[in-house]
Each structure stands twice: as structure tokens, then as C-alpha cells.
Image (spheres, grey):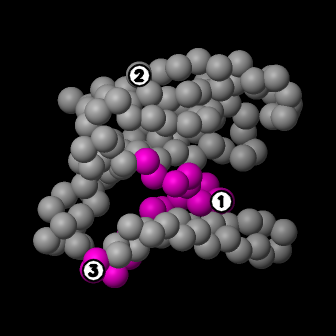
Amino acid sequence: MYALTDNTTAEHLGFGTLVLIDSLTHFQYGLVSIGDGPVELPVPSAGGKYLIYFYNWPYQDNSCFIGLLKINDSANPEKLLAEKASFETKKWAVESVKWLNDTTFFVKAFTVQPHQRNGMRFYQYLKGKIE
């Protein structure tokens, strides 16, 4: 798949979307952002069963959204991606996500002092398990 982002600005407000384009079927999958900008590039699981993506809220420190998509049979492009789970917190933001296998992933999370996003980051590592 190819990933494209579309970023626009209107009246000093920024908006963005992320679109995945299947290189074989040319079908387009729009990953809806829950905020103003596009979500981060999705990361496929080791065996290709899931995609995980995240969005850090730009105007609210230490807050994020994580989305998990199940990858279904490619014979039906309209239903290839299906929402499996999502999570939102106001306790930390995401720096990166890595997969161990098809059911376990790790989140490198960080917190900052309020209104000091470019200041010192405090890291923690979290483990997620898909049941």
C-alpha cells in the first residue's frame, strides 16, 4: 500500500487526512483523524493481521488516541480494513509503536510538563495484547 497525507489550511486552522491506496486494486482507504491533522502512518503487525496507528493531540499535552484495524481478506477490498479497537488517554502521548508479533505490540509513550512540549520528555514503555 501507498500512504498519502492531505494537509490543508483555512482561516489559520490546519486539517489533514491520511489515505492508504492498495497498489494491486487501487482501492483507497481513508483513515479518519479524530483531530485537525492526519493520524501517524499505520504500522502493520509482524504477520500482517493488524494495523495500528496513533494521533497525539496538538493542543493538549500528554494526550493521544490509538486505533487498531484488523486486516481482512484482500478478495473483498471494501471490507479489507475493519476497526478492531481504540484507546484514548490524557495521561501520555505516543512517540512510536512497535510490534512483537501479531498479537503483542509496544508503545513508547512520553509525558512533558504542561505547555513545554519541546522540553524534557519522560518516557515509559507499555505493552498491548490483542485477545
Depicted 107 relative to depicted 59: above or below: above
**Which residue sits at x=28%, y=60%?**
81
**Residue 10 visible in rendering:** yes
Camera-side mark, 3 or 1? 3
Count neighbours of disc 3 (C-alpha within 10 A) and say few if under 14, some if 14 to 19, many if 20 or more.
few
Depicted 26 relative to depicted 46: above or below: below
Count neighbours of disc 2 (C-alpha within 10 A) and say few if under 14, some if 14 to 19, many if 20 or more.
few
Locate residue 43, reporting x and y percent: 43, 48
Pick the quarter of the image with the C terminus.
top left
Q: Is residue 77 found inside the magenta-colored segment of the image?
A: no
For label 2, the residue is 127
Asked whether disc 1 touches disc 2, contact meaning CB atoms under 8 Å apart, the reply is: no
Nearer the N terminus, badge 2 or badge 3?
Answer: 3
Locate residue 19, reporting x and y percent: 48, 69
Depicted 74 relative to depicted 53: above or below: below
Between marks 1 and 2, how big is the CA–CA gap?
27 Å
For label 1, the residue is 36
Depicted 113 relative to depicted 46: above or below: above
The magenta stretch is 24-43
Asked whether disc 3 touches disc 1, contact meaning CB atoms under 8 Å apart, the reply is: no
**Residue 34 visible in rendering:** no
